[in-house]
Image: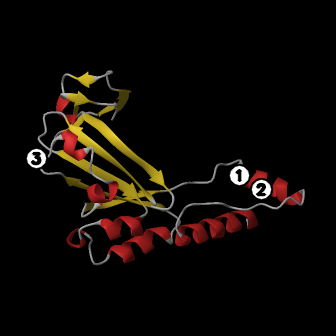
Amino acid sequence: MEQTFKEGPPGVNAEYGIETPFLVSSPLWNRDRESTYNPTTELAILKRFPFESNMKRMTVIVWRKNHERFQVVVKGAPETIARICDPVTVPSNYDAVLKHYTIQGYRVLALAMKDLSPHLTWSHVRKCSREELESHVELVGLLIVQNQLKKETLPTINLLHDAHISTVMVTGNGNYSFVTQVLIAALDRMY
C-alpha cells in the first residue's frame, strides 16, 4: 500500500477552503482486499501538537476531504492515552493486554481519536487548547511494534566491553519492554 505525504499548496487550498499544511493519501481497500485510489482517502493535517516527553503523546487535527467533521488523532504511551480516553472505550483487560505484549519486549503505542462537532468551524477549532481537543477521545487500539537488534549491535557491544568501555541502554520504552530487551540482549551475548 503506497501512501503519499506532501506539503499542501501555499495559502488557502481551494479543495478544502482553508490552509492545508500537509496532505496524506493512501489507497482505499475494498471488501475484496483490492487497493484502489480514491480521493476521499486524502487527509489534510491542519495542526500538529508535537510529541512532548512530559505528556508522552502527540496529536494532530485532520480533515478528510469531503467529510463534514474535523478529527483529532492522538498517539502515545498506552498508560497516558488510557487516562485521556472516554472510559467506556477502554476495555477492562487493557492493562493485562498491554502487559502481555510489553513483557515480551514489544514496543506498544496507543491510538485514539474523536470526531469534533460538525458545527465547529476551523476558526473555532484552531483556537481550542490541546487539552480540550484531547479530552474524551475514543481508544482505537494498540499498535504493537517489534524492534529487533541489528546484526552489528552485539559485536559492537562486545568490542566496547572488551575495551573496558561502559555501555548503557537509554530507552523511552515502558519498564516491561526495557527489562525484556535487556534480558534478550544478555541471552544473545551468552550464546
Q: Position of residue 30 (x, y in %)?
A: 17, 39
Q: Which residue is mark 1?
A: 153
Q: Are marks 2 and 1 in contact (CB under 8 Å)?
A: yes
Residue at x 33% of width, y 54% of height = 130
Q: Position of residue 22 (x, y in %)?
A: 34, 32
- Nearer the observer, 191 or 4: 4
Q: Secondary structure at mark 3?
A: loop
> In the image, 76: left or right of 184?
left
Tell me how far mark 2 sits from mark 1, CA to CA: 6 Å
Q: Residues within 10 Å of mark 3 (few under 14, many from 20)?
A: few
- Nearer the observer, 184 or 128: 128
Q: Are marks 3 and 1 in contact (CB under 8 Å)?
A: no
- Nearer the observer, 149 or 61: 61
**20 w.r.t. 130: above or below:** above
Residue at x 77% of width, y 52% of height = 155
Q: Is residue 104 visible?
A: yes
Amino acid, disc 2 = Ile
Name which of mark 3 and mark 1 comes first in the sequence.
Answer: 3
Residue at x 34% of width, y 31% of height = 21
Amino acid, disc 3 = Pro
Tell me how far mark 3 sits from mark 1, CA to CA: 51 Å
Quadrant in the picture for residue 121: top left
**45 w.r.t. 155: above or below:** above
Q: Is residue 37 visible?
A: no
Q: Position of residue 37 (x, y in %)?
A: 22, 28
Q: Which residue is mark 3?
A: 118
Q: Residues within 10 Å of mark 1 (few under 14, many from 20)?
A: few
Residue at x 27% of width, y 58% of height = 132
Q: Quadrant of the C terminus?
A: bottom right
> In the image, 8: left or right of 34?
right
